[in-house]
Structure formats: C-alpha cells, structure tokens
Amino acid sequence: MGKILIFGHKNPDTDSILSALLMEKFDKNLGFDVEAVRLGNVNKETQYVLDYLGIEAPRMIDEVLDGQEVVLVDHNEFAQSVNNIENATITCVVDHHRICDFKTSAPLYYRAEPLGCTASIMYKKYMEENIKIERNDAILMLSAIISDTLLFKSPTCTEEDVKIAKELEKIANINMEEYGLNMLKAGTDLSDLTADELITLDSKEVMLKDVKAKIAQVNTASIPDMLKRKSELENSIANTVNNEGLDLFVLAITDIIESNSQVIVLGKRADLVEKSYNVKLVDNTAFLPGVVSRKKQILPILTENA
C-alpha cells in the first residue's frame, strides 16, 4: 500500500499540521516509510510558522483507499478525519482529546494524554526514544503549544505544557512571548476570507449525545470588528445547518487578547447554549466571558446539558 500516511483532523489548525510533521520525523527515525499530509487548507497562523522556518506544508488529500495504513495525530473521531477512514488501517494514534466513536479492526499503538497540545506529547516521545530535538523541531513543537494554549492563557494549558515550552525555548533560541504573540496575531488577519471560509476555518463536527452539532472557532484581536460581518456569517451558518442536517452550529469568536468569546448560534437546539451558560441569545448571539477553549469550556459543557 506504500507509505504510511500521517495526518491531523479536517480544517487543520497549527497543532494538527505541525504534529503530523513531527510524527513524520519521529517515525522515520524508527525506520518507518511515512509521509505527513493534511486534510485542509493551511491557516495564516500555521503559515507564519512554516514561512519562519522556510518549509513547505504537507500535501493535501481528500480521502484514503481501503486498507491504507494511517497514523492519526490530534484527533480520533471519524467525523473529523479523512474520508473513508473507517476502511483504513489505523496503526497509531497520538492525541490529547476525548476518545469518541473510535474503533479499529486490529490492535494499534494509542497514546493519549490530557495535555494542552499534541506536540507536547511528541516532545515526550522524542525524549523517550532519544531522538535529538533540532532547532526547527523545537520551533514546531513550541509553536503548536503556543497555538493550542493561546500563549498559556487557555484552561487546557497544564504545568507540563509550560515546563516543556520553557525547555523548547532554550533549544529554539527565541523569545517565545514575542514570537508567540506575533504568530497568534498573524492568525487573526481574516479580512480576505469569505464567510464560508471563516466558519470552516477551524470547525469540528461532534455528537452531543443525540444532538448533531458543529463547533467552529475563529481567533481575533477585536470581536466588534468580526461582528461587523455577523449577517453574512449567519447566512453561511444557516446554509450549513440546512445542507448538513445539523441540530446546532456554534461559532465562537475568541478574543486572544482579552480571553473572552462571542458566540453566534443557530439550529433547532440553540437553546442548549442558553441552558449551558445561563445566557439569553439575542439575535442569535451571546457573550461568554472567560471562554476560550472549545475542548474544555464548550464541548464538555454542551455535552453535559444535551
């Protein structure tokens, strides 16, 4: 079947793409014939990192053939993975999310830890196998950690993530606060994206018990500026809800400076957001102070109240 393919989730974020690249090097060091690929376009934040290092993004794929050997990083839910994943041969998973709707027909290596970032787990794997972390590797790992933890402000960030980041900062020989803020700001330049692109930029399909939902997130330095596009965003969300038969669509517009989110919510189960956060949706929107993490502050709370 050729090379084993390594990839993160659809609508890939920085951790998803960079962890695939890190896993590629890791597996090659162990003698495996592997290739990192991606399941969507590269966002501006990730592109900032790739440009900084002068490396190319992995090639993009839409589906895999039956029996294709694959490694999953930064995800495990089939709804978030490549088309035809259910007929692929999953040999390994490295992830930091909940385990949901996952099954295989054969044994595999599975590494899941409740850390802020998949790249933090990759750091530990490199150390365990005595694989030297070069400067570029350190910058890839550090960038992914900064991205997923919003420069250590997210509740998903653990003490272990911070400790790892400090070690990586030494190897990378950069000021991670300055570099990290520039990287995060690069990802907030969304002016040239259409509404359809914005709501799919970082979107994950999930089942909240029996509620079929999509939770999307965009980072910004100004929520009011993003809300100037509210009408077109609502139209795109409504079309997605209708076309995909969703019960709920939540778009979280997250202010990376002030650490708050404004949500735009549509679908017949929009009441789930009101119930979960004790808020009233006014014109399909509500302000959620202190909410920045889809993984810890949105997904589990909605699931609990579904």
Image: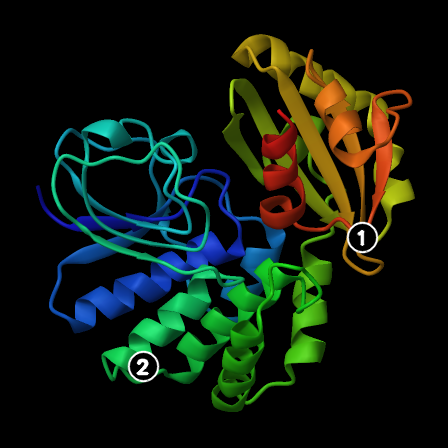
Colouring style: rainbow
Q: Report which residue position mark 1 lands on.
A: 290
Q: Are marks 2 and 1 in contact (CB under 8 Å)?
A: no
Q: Nearer the viewer, residue 282 or 193?
A: 282
- Residue 168's tag is none
Q: Nearer the viewer, residue 179 or 162?
A: 162
Task: Give the residue drawn at x 30%, y 63%.
Answer: 23
Name the kind of residue labelled 2 in the image: Met
Task: Give the residue drawn at x 71%, y 23%.
Answer: 272
Q: Nearer the viewer, residue 179 or 153?
A: 153
Say left or right for 108 vs 128.
Answer: left
Say left or right for 300 vs 63.
Answer: right
Q: Residue furthest front?
A: 304
Task: Give the residue drawn at x 19%, y 28%.
Answer: 87
The answer to whether residue 197 is seen in the rendering is: no
Mark pair 2, 1: CA separation: 34 Å
Please say if 30 is above or below 227: below
Question: Are there few (<14), some (14-19), or many (20+) residues within 10 Å of tag 2?
Answer: few
Please say if 115 is above or below 286: below
Name the kind of residue labelled 1 in the image: Gly
Q: Indicate the quadrant containing the N terminus: top left, top right, bottom left or bottom right.
A: top left
Q: Report which residue position mark 2 lands on.
A: 127
Please say if 166 is above or below 263: below
